[in-house]
Image: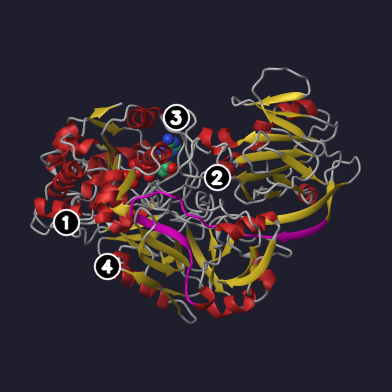
Amino acid sequence: MSYSTSKPKKAGTLNAYFKPAVRNNNNNNNNDNNNRSLSSSWRSISPLSNTQTQQQKSSATIDLTDNNSDDDDLIILDDIPKNAYRGSRANNSNSNSQQESFGSQGIQTQELSSTSKFRKEPSYNLDQRQKPFFSSYTFQTSHTTTSTFGVRGMSSSTTNDSYKNNSSNRVVPVERKVSQPSGMSLTDRLGSNVSHPIQGAGMVSSSSFGWKKTVDTSSSSSSSTTTTSGTKRGYSSITSSSSSSSAGWVSSTSTNKKKRELPATFITSASALGALNGKATKERTIGGFKSVTSSSSNKKSYGSNMSFYGNNNNTNNNNNRYSSNKRKNNNKSSYRPKLSAEQQKVFDIVVNERRSIFFTGSAGTGKSVLLRAIIDSLREKYPDGVAITAPTGIAACNINGSTIHSFAGIGLGQDPPMKLVQKVQSNKKASERWRRTRVLIIDEISMVDAELFDKIELIARTMKASQKPFGDIQLIVTGDFFQLPPVSRYGMARFAFESKCWSKVINKTIMLKQVFRQKDSEFVDILNEMRLGRLSEAAIQKFRSLSRTPQTYNMIEPTELYALRDQVDKSNTARLNGLPGDIRTFKAHDTGDKAKVEGCIAPEAVHLKKDAQVMLLKNMDQTLVNGSLGIVVGFVGDEKYNTLTDIRRCMPPSKFSGAQSSEIEPDLESMKSQQWPIVQFTDGREVLMESEQWSIELPGGEVVASRTQIPLMLAWAMSIHKSQGQTLESVRVDLGKVFEKGQAYVALSRATSLEGLQILNFDESKVMAHERVATFYQNLDTV
Ligand SMILES: Nc1ncnc2c1ncn2[C@@H]1O[C@H](COP(=O)(O)OP(=O)(O)OP(=O)(O)O)[C@@H](O)[C@H]1O
């Protein structure tokens, strides 16, 4: 690898652009130390002051070459004063005083001038799963100004070693926003930003992410402030699909008719590359945006293996110390906590020891977080071989997987076992899917009945032509049997642990003990009593005392949870009708198998008004995630959202933010005609919501069904079933119509605190647990 001061002309060159940030560095005389400690200081960056914001205008263009030679990490900074920056991926221990080693991977840089430094920093510190070719860069033009930017290229199917030699998995710029509100540390922001998941096997989620910016930069002499001499800015969003998956939901941006023919943020890999190369030549309207596509000839690689996720995680399991994102709905935050010791233990057993396992734990013990970590890591290992499933459409959607029925190819699964086997055998695609599967993940196992579990096991053995349990497929099963039970047509179903094959296929069961969702030990204790269906008098009194109005923490009203969908609809409709103004209706555009689309989390019709409370159904960045709550503040075309400036201000993070001019820009007229809603989220951001696409894809990419809809649903109220997996700060639970064992527990355990929880119609007789489940749990190991 070498760094040069001239622009590479090789094919495959990417232009990567950075938006400078300003490090809050008050000690101008401590530059050497600063440089040494950049990693830590950079990650603890403070929100920008006004002065710093001025400084932030500094920017530069950086090119990253993409080739397979030694210099594939070539980095060139144009227009930077004293523009000689050199760095190398260190593989020596030479302690040249001008070289600095960063972190355990030994990335080094060389300072080539007294005032300008460039340092390449891999993101492993921020997210250990991220591949090295997501890199964060810090560029220091003076003692007080540090510019950062990020470049990422992700693939679900590459290993750390292979990425360098695989030009199809190259870098794409991702904007770093140091000025985001939130008070979060940059570590959090970057950590989570880079961590948007590649969805687990089973769902190729394509989501837009990317931008383009070309900026001339100059430094203002020797002062600490750099200024921008001219700005030209464009954005391109890149959508791609991970290349391997089992059947599953795919979340991507809109493809719709006419002006929504393609996702607004969708650009094919080729055009994305071209745009990145600055070779864009062709303009077209994509959704509400004008898109410029590229004439670049080197169109081959970028896209098919890259995935950009506002909503999904990609991973890099460097050393099995893992941090992870939430798999279900991602709730309040998509930041990836470091796994606890017990989570890590389970992770090791699954990933390193390759054991078939059932891990469980009460609500909030981090099963989702752990599962995400496991999925990400296993997909690294077996890009084509990880099937991610759940028993219901919503649960599957939450983990971006497919239903177990859909994956297995068994339709409703009600036929006798041998008939189902024949059915799968005669289905070429399903057979192929089974043959490829090395790991089968089943989430929300409490809702899988024993009969189905046995049938799946038989099919697995047959399709893998092996008499070993599950045909030697590694089985990873998780969930909490104290939560929602299987739905049965004939009375009480048997649980999966009561199946004939359970004890043969699961060779390790582990219960996670540490509760993360609730911090208050009193709350944790009474929830545990409730889980077991055995409430003490003190717990009953406590729950009764919670009928008062709950605390709220922002503009969001408490989320109401009901047992029945009718109750939910009634509440949401009443609230909507109570608002002044016209209802705007957004109808979904469905394709393919309608029955399959019904499981989609996005509603068929979304009715909105200004001031409606809504939930985001798609991840957009680290804070705007599936599960984020917000308020509709208007619609494109309203007085407040009527100009290009207004629109740009509200661009989703994956598209625009404060663009001056661009190669892809909002098509105002189109947007006005669509009347896209603008939602204000709890972090204060107002974000335009245009349609997105969810689709069910089989491995190999065949789309069997899709839904295009705005990623919102009314969220004054939601069903307890839908709330499973959610974390809610302020919640009002109505237990009046609870009918299922485990239902009350699921509802109450969504709350993070007693202060934020209100319980209506509390009745201890509604707190029920299955004795068989309780017995089963008495025998589980803990780590
Ligand atoms: N290792 C960890 N460190 C810090 N926070 C964590 C950790 N693991 C999980 N959490 C947090 O705890 C909360 C609950 O996690 P998670 O949703 O994974 O639990 P769960 O067991 O799946 O819950 P449920 O069964 O109710 O769906 C989330 O806010 C998550 O971010």
Of all residues shown, which one is farthest toward the right?
Answer: 221
Label placed on residue 320: 3
Looking at the image, which is closer to me, 164 or 588?
164
Give the mark nearest the N terminus, 2 or 4.
2
Dividing the image into 4 quarters, which one contains the N terminus? top right
Label placed on residue 69: none
The residue identified by callout 2 is 169
What amino acid is found at the position of numbered circle 3 in the picture?
Asn
What amino acid is found at the position of numbered circle 2 in the picture?
Asn
Give the mark nearest the N terminus, 4 or 1.
1
- Does 406 sit above or below residue 473? below
Give the mark nearest the N terminus, 2 or 3.
2
Q: Quadrant of residue 594?
A: bottom left
Q: Nearer the viewer, mark 2 or mark 4?
A: 2
The residue identified by callout 1 is 423
The span from disc 2 to disc 1 (Cα, nearest Å) is 38 Å
The span from disc 3 to disc 1 (Cα, nearest Å) is 39 Å
Question: Do tag 4 and tag 1 residues touch (Cβ < 8 Å)?
Answer: no
Residue 549 lies left or right of residue 611; in this view the side is: left
Q: Position of residue 669 (x, y in %)?
A: 62, 79
Residue at point 53%, 39% (across, down): 130
The span from disc 2 to disc 4 (Cα, nearest Å) is 36 Å
